[in-house]
Image (cartoon, rainbow, N blue to C red):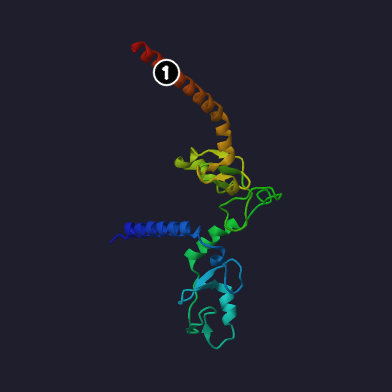
Amino acid sequence: MNNAPRVMCEGKERKRAQRAVMARANSLCEEQFECPICTDVFKNPVSLPCGHNFCDGCIRRHWKGRERCKCPLCKREFNKSLQLNVNTLFRDIVDNCKQDYVVSDDEKPSSPEDVLCDCCLYTKRRAVKTCLVCLTSFCDKHLEPHRKVASLTSHALTDPVPKLQEKMCTRHHRILEKISCYQQKVGPFRQRLKVTFVHVKTEWKTQCDDVNRLQC
């Protein structure tokens, strides 16, 4: 019996699940990618039956020469014959998220005035654009969806806006400078319109009074 279609189906399901987990991993905090023993980013993470994760090398060194194998966190005991296997899915997630740790010199902020990316989880990169729709500043890496996703390509991008939250109008949910520019353009027109309306109203009232006097 040919099991090829079943194997392919299982492979697709596994890849789909892996992509979903990696997507959710973007919202995890930094500590969840650090080994509790060495406090560094996981290297070949292994999962114990209690659910806690450690670097393969760290947990082996921790148990070396001990009579009892205990989880360093919850103190649950395990048989010394426990076989440790690298959690390949979690390792791939960690390796994928390590990219946020690697920041080139060109991406690093060069002065205190530089605007930082709002999406970098760990080492902050220098922002290259601010989206006036998302009201978020992005580095070149996190700006990529605005270049490729159809629903985002129409968003208005501008040079990085420093202290974005301080410049936000809570009423209009827009940058105050943009509203001020709009008011400067529209304000005089509104004033002229108001004067014209008052003039027309006065003329209309005068004509109505004249008609009433003639009827009398």
Q: Measuring 55% from the left and 33% from the top, which residue is drawn there?
A: 183
As rendered, which of 113 and 44 lies closer to the eye? 113
Name the kind of residue labelled 1 in the image: Trp
- The answer to whether 151 is drawn above or below residue 195 in the figure is below
Task: Note whether 96 is above or below 141 in the view shown.
Answer: below
- Whether residue 141 sits left or right of residue 113 in the image: it is left
Q: Can you give x and y, in whole percent of width and height, for residue 96 in the image?
A: 53, 58
Which residue is outermost to the top? Answer: 214
Q: Residue furthest bottom?
A: 67
Kindly identify the residue that appears in the image at 61 percent across and 72 percent down: 38
Picture coordinates of residue 44 (x, y %)? Answer: 55, 68
Q: Quadrant of the N terminus?
A: bottom left
Q: Answer with left or right where residue 209 lies relative to residue 84.
A: left
Residue situated in front as seen by the camera: 144 or 82: 144
Q: Which residue is mark 1?
A: 204
Q: Residue furthest front?
A: 216
Identify the residue at horizontal 46%, vertical 74% (top origin): 51
- State the residue in front, 59 or 108: 108
Q: Position of residue 75 (x, y in %)?
A: 51, 82
